[in-house]
Amino acid sequence: MRVITSLSVRDLAAAVSRRELTAEAVVRAYAERIEEQEPEIKAWQHFDAGLALSQARELDRADVNKPLQGVPIGVKDLMDTADMPTTYGSPIYAGHRPPFDAACVASCREAGAVIMGKTVTTEFATFQPGPTRNPRAPSAMPHTPGGSSSGSAAAVAAGMVPLAFGTQTAGSIVRPAAYCGVVGYKPTHGTLPLAGTKPLSPSLDTIGVLARSVEDAAFFIGVLARTDYALASPGALRVGLCQTPHWDRASADAPQARSDAARLLEKSGARVSDMAWPAEWNGLTQAQIDIMGNEALAAFAPERQQHAKLFSAAFADFLAAARTTDGARAAAAYALAERARCALATVFRSVDVLLAPSAEGEAPAGLGATGNPIFNRMWTLLGVPCVHVPTGVGMQGLPVGVTVIGPRWGDAQTLAAAERLHRSVQQARS
């Protein structure tokens, strides 16, 4: 079992396609990991080992070789699945059975993947936590796994699946990846279709992945986007160090992680320089908040009208705050975002990627909140590809890392730089 669960996604799919492994053996190995660890971690909203094994046996009977053949996938419970309940993290949708898969889930099945189950999401991908615990923290001292892709990050960190879908509207892929010590890849906005995924803020919502390695993340999203993300980066990689306007919010761990990452990249031959932060961009975080609230207010009009009593206090407060943003303020936020996107494209003429904090520091203690997306909001607003790379541990022994950021539709160069950093981190540990 340990050998199967240590294979890369590409190698795992190739082994099943060559009939060196059966999909059933792969799913059984991962199902055993889930059954062993789930009682403590609580990463899954829905898991049915029998259903997963049935999918695997069907693949084994078919004479096909697909790019994700037999690869177990966790699906965030924000995405529709025709054969499993989809609750969006809310009691309003308890027992809800969608008639169709979300587009990204259907693409996974077409590529030969096995849908293992639904991972825990916060309520409607916002702020009310689920029960999931961070598997990197001592069992006697529970820490949040982050949100909203809580279960996906925890499941990958615990080795329950090699890959799990996440979504990001503020910081819901990068921050859980940072807290749980895994790779989190938020592609350029629009890379994967949102059809069948519960909308929160469509101009911000982005589907991505939590993975054990940059290579796995790049291969998976590449298959779904029909793109081959080659990970070979040029020797003269140009890296800009970006503090963002919120540098004072970072604990000592965040700047140390960035310094360590910069040093390793320089050692690998990269040229590292500081990036000047335009004063106008100081408003990007508030612009993201305004846009997210403005669009969420519209997206959840049906639930507000019929089931508002079933909202958590946190979600009700979020919608109440959104009501204070009028159309003029929202329009100003959209305009600022558009200006910043154009200006950022100019920045990327002089650097290939940026390095920025992924979170304020290590995962906060307790399960009552999922941490602050303060270092993620602006990058989601700008629609750029972001890859969280774990670099080590902080002062409490919990994971820390950095975000590698590239230009819109520059996912290939962003992933290549992230892979270079990830490989350098691994080499430094060996």
Image (cartoon, rainbow, N blue to C red):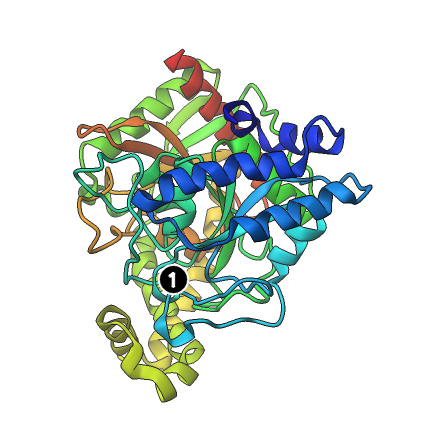
Where does the image place residue 19, in percent across and percent down from the top left? 75, 30
| Count of picture labels | 1
Kind of residue sitting beneath label 1: Ala
Residue 357 appears in the picture as rendered: no
- Describe residue 84's horizontal placement relative to residue 90 as left or right: right
- Describe residue 366's horizontal placement relative to residue 54 as left or right: left
- The structure residue drawn at horizontal position 22% and vertical position 37%, both measured from the top left corner, is 139
Where does the image place residue 195, in percent across and percent down from the top left? 59, 66
- The structure residue drawn at horizontal position 34% and vertical position 60%, both measured from the top left corner, is 122
- The structure residue drawn at horizontal position 57% and vertical position 28%, both measured from the top left corner, is 8
Q: Residue furthest right?
A: 63
State the quadrant of the C terminus: top left
In this rendering, is residue 214 above or below 164? above
Where does the image place residue 182, in percent across and percent down from the top left? 41, 35
Label 1: how many Cα within 10 Å (few below 14, some 14–19, many 20+): many
- 285 and 24: which is toward the camera: 24
Query: Badge 1 is on which residue?
Result: 125
- 36 and 18: which is toward the camera: 36
Q: Quadrant of residue 330?
A: bottom left
- 180 and 130: which is toward the camera: 130
